[in-house]
Image (spheres, grey):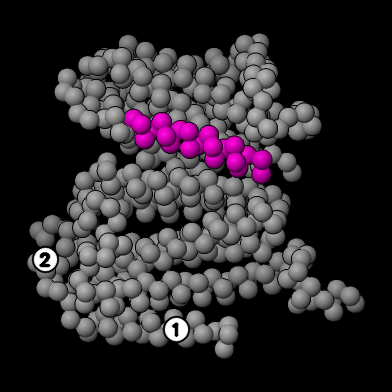
Amino acid sequence: MKKWWWKILCIVLLTYTFIGGLLFPVPRIMILNETIRNLYFHVCMWFAMMILFTISVINAVKYLNKHDLKYDIKSRQYAVVGIVFGLLGYATGVIWMSFTWADPNNPAVASFSAIAKEPKLIGAAIALLIYFAYLVLRDSISDIDKKARISAVYNIFAFAFLFPSIWILPRLLPSLHPGGEGNPALNYNDIDARMRLVFYPAVIGWTLLGSWIVSLKVRMNILKEKEHLSDIYLQEKNAPIHEA
Amino acid sequence: MISLSQIWALFKKDLLLEIRQQYTFYGILLYVGATIFVIYMAMEQTESQVWNGLFWIIQLFICINAVAKSFLQESRGRMLYFQALLSPQNFVLAKLLFNSLLMVVMSAISLGLFMLFLGNPVQKMAEFFGLVLLGGWGLSLVFSFLAAIAAKAQQSAAIMAILGFPLIIPQLLMLMKVSNTFFSKSNPEILTTVVLLAIIDLFVIILAIILFPFLWKD
């Protein structure tokens, strides 16, 4: 019970998100109409992505402190799943955009270059490019310890840059997103009370789903890299084999 | 930890090496000249917006080429020698200092060549020159640290570009935005952006001091 309560919570919250998100009443706003329900999916993807990337950086810092490859595996897997959530965020955003921002007389593709210069899109693109580069950098180094150390350094350096750029970009470019000044979804008063009921549980639910996927991937990779992990983790699990 | 005499000695060593074997300096100079000449051939007339965009993109590529070799040139044996003698903070600060100087010089030269070949749409010359130096300095700091990472990964300039482009986008956007205001006589508010650029530069130096020790030893 101790270890898997959050998995049940994740299932419950996501079921609630789908049922509540599609059926509960929402405010009627011009142009947005029913597409406003996408908030529970689109915005949550970005929240989950940023949270997963942040955990990835925390694990990178832990690796540099303790030199334990377990943290390196975690750092990498959190980054990978964060990228998946980022791509899903783009996908849900494209659906939303094609009903609201795109010129109705043109196909959505034709309005792409006008819409793509959007601070939030650029911020997300920077985040994804950073973590793609992180993966390329990792794969270009063959020595395992060196790979872990150098990619952890890049992870921290890039993340320390990412946050300021997300704050700076909206000041430089005009935006179509609501709440251009500041952080729209974090501001308590920006979201209608009825929507908050579903939105906050949805954020937690999607983030838990991400962590669940990561935990499976981490366990798989720890098994794969068994012989390189020579610390407490192994002593717990495999002590008899090593003694023999 | 940080000792000015060590930084100065390392800086002088890099400078002397550069003066004695001038091929890298002239190599970059040739790169600057050739690139700007190609642009001169390709463009008939440049509007100030295009001029500005091209100028900063060229700065970016010059910076990658100028800074890329700074950590790669140290041989394995010499690195071991440095590790015995110096603290990593001093080493990285000396490198940042040298690359800053190199890039500031290159920025000034490329600005001169740009004006010679592509005309001069800038209205406020002194301010623009200051911004070019600040921008060159900022670019060199970011790419110096990435050069250290790339050198450890035994990779060429290609990986530096992959690692650096996403990081440099906001800085480049800010530089272009501020420099755009120098093309007209009007006086919009730019001070906060310039201060922000300077803060980012200091931030990079601090990050380099904190993170470089982890790259230093194998």
Determine whether the residue tagged by mark 2 lies in a helix, strand or loop. loop
Determine whether the residue tagged by mark 1 lies in a helix, strand or loop. helix
Write the start and end of the magenta stretch as one range: B194-214
Residue drawn at the location 22% of the way across and 84% of the way down: A23
The reply to the same-chain question for discs 2 and 1 is: yes
Question: B212 or B23: which is nearer to us?
Answer: B212
Q: Which residue is mark 2?
A: A31
Q: Amino acid at mark 1?
A: Leu
Q: Main secondary structure of the magenta part?
A: helix
The quadrant the N terminus of chain A occupies is: bottom right
Q: Is residue A146 magenta?
A: no
Q: Is residue A71 left or right of residue A180?
A: right
**Where is residue A208 drawn, in percent x and y?**
46, 75
> How would you rate the neighbour count of disc 1 (Cα within 10 Å): few for under 14, some for 14-19, many for 20 or more?
some
Is residue B125 in sight in this rendering?
A: yes
Residue drawn at the location 76% of the way across and 76% of the way down: A236
Q: Disc 1 is attached to a residue of which chain?
A: A
> How far apart in space, not on screen, are marks 2 and 1 (Cα)?
35 Å
Establish if B129 lies above or below B88. Answer: above
> How would you rate the neighbour count of disc 2 (Cα within 10 Å): few for under 14, some for 14-19, many for 20 or more?
few
Residue drawn at the location 19% of the way across and 28% of the way down: B188
Q: Which residue is mark 1?
A: A9
Q: Is residue B200 magenta?
A: yes
